[in-house]
């Protein structure tokens, strides 16, 4: 498949996410309602934590719990002897503002690494890029003042808001990573977005095979942060 059709497919998948009625807290939901759907109880801390702060892509929408990307990362950690506990703080439909509001809860305990996967729903709603960027920056700086390493994951905006918005949206993640000197995965859905066989029926959330690809790509960015820590 050539590059151009692949880009179009990614745009179609992201646009479908904006229009979907299958995700309960999608574009029409308020940020306040989204925040209230956060997990009720954080797991008891027995080991240093890696927190995944994100939306439905982190939560594992359409998957069994053990098939979600954070769960797959936990399995990889255990297999390689890293003594970390992964916390899945993903909430379907969450925006960067919603993630910021529940940051204090999410960073409870001995958190060593924060995987920040937010912004997709900002793009789907066409929210101002500057506001999203500021929310993500605040999350990053808050984590870093606590000595927490951050892995920022990038996202693409749907094409329906025009090329200028799409370009600004993509650049925001890249610039944040450079300005804040944090680890960076340029596109969370790299090699998965727009591929029908790697997504569930809605065409926008990874299926188990797609989640494994996301986890493998993310692991390459996460591992250098792990190696800075004690096993």
Image (spheres, rainbow, N blue to C red):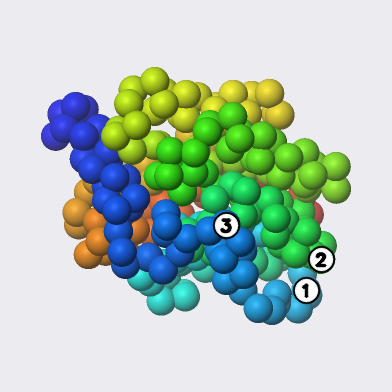
Q: Position of residue 59 (x, y in %)?
A: 50, 65
> Dot 2: few (<14), some (14–19), or many (≥20) neighbours within 10 Å?
some
Residue 110 sits in which quadrant?
bottom right
Q: Residue reaching furthest top?
A: 164
Q: Which badge, 2 or 1, comes first in the chain's sequence?
A: 1
> Dot 3: few (<14), some (14–19), or many (≥20) neighbours within 10 Å?
some
Give the quarter of the figure containing the N terminus: top left
Is residue 137 visible to the viewer in this orientation of the structure?
A: yes
**Separation of marks 2 and 1 at Cα, in angstroms:** 6 Å
Q: Secondary structure at mark 1?
A: loop
User: Measuring 34% from the left and 50% from the top, which residue is drawn there?
Assistant: 18
**Separation of marks 3 and 1 at Cα, in angstroms:** 28 Å
In the figure, 60 relative to 185: above or below?
A: below
User: Measuring 32% from the left and 26% from the top, which residue is drawn there?
Assistant: 162
Is residue 212 visible to the viewer in this orientation of the structure?
A: no
Q: Secondary structure at mark 3?
A: helix
Q: Relative to 164, is 108 on the left or the right?
A: right
Q: Which residue is mark 2?
A: 109
Q: Which badge, 3 or 1, comes first in the chain's sequence?
A: 3
Q: Nearer the viewer, mark 2 or mark 3?
A: 3
Q: Which residue is mark 3?
A: 31
């Amino acid at each position: 498949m050539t590059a151009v059709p692949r880009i179009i497919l990614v745009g179609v998948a992201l646009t479908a996410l904006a229009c979907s009625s299958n995700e309960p807290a999608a574009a029409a939901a308020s940020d306040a309602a989204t925040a209230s759907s956060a997990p009720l109880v954080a797991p008891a801390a027995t080991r240093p934590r890696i927190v995944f702060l994100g939306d439905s892509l982190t939560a594992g929408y359409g998957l069994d719990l053990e098939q979600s990307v954070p769960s797959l990362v936990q399995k990889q950690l255990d297999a390689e002897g890293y003594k970390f506990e992964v916390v899945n703080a993903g909430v379907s439909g969450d925006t960067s503002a919603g993630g910021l509001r529940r940051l204090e809860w999410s960073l409870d305990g001995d958190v060593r690494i924060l995987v920040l996967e937010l912004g997709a729903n900002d793009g789907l709603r066409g929210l101002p890029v500057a506001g999203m960027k500021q929310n993500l920056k605040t999350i990053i700086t808050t984590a870093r003042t606590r000595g927490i390493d951050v892995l920022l994951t990038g996202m693409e905006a749907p094409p329906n808001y025009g090329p200028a918005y799409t370009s600004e949206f993509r650049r925001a993640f890249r610039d944040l990573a450079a300005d804040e000197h944090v680890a960076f995965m340029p596109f969370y859905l790299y090699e998965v977005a727009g591929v029908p066989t790697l997504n569930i029926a809605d065409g926008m959330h990874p299926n188990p095979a797609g989640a494994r690809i996301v986890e493998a790509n993310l692991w390459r960015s996460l591992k250098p942060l792990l190696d800075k820590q004690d096993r």
